[in-house]
Image (tube, helix red, strand yellow):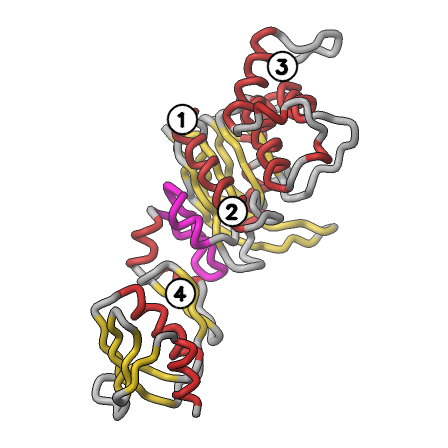
Amino acid sequence: MPIVKTRRLSIGYTKGKNSTLVQSNLNLQLRRGEMVCLIGPNGSGKTTLLRTLAGLQEPLQGDVMIDDKNISEFTQHEKALQIALVLTDKVQIENATVKDIVTLGQHPYTHWIGGLTPEGRKKVDEAIRMVHLDDKSGHYLNELSDGERQRVMIAKALAQDTPLIILDEPTAHLDLPNRVEVMLLLHRLAHKTQKSILLSTHELDLALQAADRIWLLNQNEGVIYGVPEDLVIDGSFNRVFQSEAYYFNSTNGNFSMNYTLPKKISVSSSDNTRLYWTLRALARAGYSVESGASTTITITENGWQMEGKLFETIESLLSTLQE
């Protein structure tokens, strides 16, 4: 059974008496134990949708259902028992340890005159273990790297022990190794804990690998949803991310630049890896690859052969072509 369902949902924002519609007629489902990545161009409504699903702003029309109950009927305490939210902003708290921050996730379960229960302490410790910060539990937040800080906020959400975790751009401030680590961590947590994890991201290549499903937000088509590979094969990514400057390469799942290619060349190779990187370099140099072109490059294990010469690197090949 889905943990989240929307019915004819319209989202946007209101200023004074005026409302601006961002998306309409959204009928979505988020299942337990799966990680869903919300992807779309800037301005398509990713943050607005997350805020609406989290109950931070009211829908313009339609319903958001959490466990078959309309979110508008939840009290603040009930929301805290159902939804853990991790926002983009960096957390700056002095004199607070990792354990102090993660313990804040237990706030829905603590009474104003009492502290953590033994069960609550166990959940805090388990959350810290699950994000692999056992050895940093007593460290202050300002002693941690950006990647470790993000894992602290994920641990705080885990300690809140809600069936739904929503994250807005959780990898926004991280370098590549930490972006990969956080995405893998969230994927594993969804499957291990059977919690539903919904996150927005611009990391399309990582989302294609880590997400169980993708919600592809398009200003013209609403939300297209499905397994990542299906959305690649049916051309959804190309439709959503159309641009004169780049295109979505469905062969490798990356964005490729649209170069002007006035020159023609022929290439043959049995080495797919060398062929791929050679074609990239040639495109950057303004060459389109066409059979029957007057100049031919043959890629071998020893290098690149062209017009009777052997080149050991792509750089030397390009230098000769440019001459």
Where is residue 82, by image quadrant?
Answer: top right
Instruction: Identify the mark nearer the N-term, 3 or 1.
Output: 3
Say what secondary structure mark 2 lies in: helix
**Mark 1 or 2: the one toward you:** 2
Instruction: Identify the mark nearer the N-term, 3 or 2.
Output: 3
In the rendered image, the quadrant that contains the N terminus is top left
One can see residue 76 in this view: no
Q: Which residue is the site of mark 2?
A: 177
Q: Which residue is the site of mark 4?
A: 248
Q: Quick one: 291 or 63, which is closer to the camera?
A: 291
Say what secondary structure mark 4 lies in: strand
Q: Which residue is the site of mark 1?
A: 192
In magenta segment, residue 156: no
C-alpha separation, residue under disc 3 versus residue under disc 2 = 35 Å
C-alpha separation, residue under disc 1 versus residue under disc 2 = 22 Å
- Residue type beneath disc 1: Lys
- Residue type beneath disc 3: Tyr
- CB under 8 Å between discs 1 and 2: no
In magenta segment, residue 220: yes
One can see residue 183 in this view: yes
For image coordinates 43% across by 62% down, the residue present is: 240
Q: Position of residue 290 (x, y in %)?
A: 26, 84
- Residue type beneath disc 2: Pro
Q: Position of residue 42 (x, y in %)?
A: 56, 59
Vertical comparison of 320 with 238: above or below: below
- Residue type beneath disc 4: Phe
Q: Which residue is the site of mark 3?
A: 109
C-alpha separation, residue under disc 4 versus residue under disc 2 = 23 Å
Residue found at the very far right of the displayed protein: 94
Vertical comparison of 155 with 176: above or below: above
- Range covered by the magenta-colored residues: 204-226
Say what secondary structure mark 3 lies in: helix
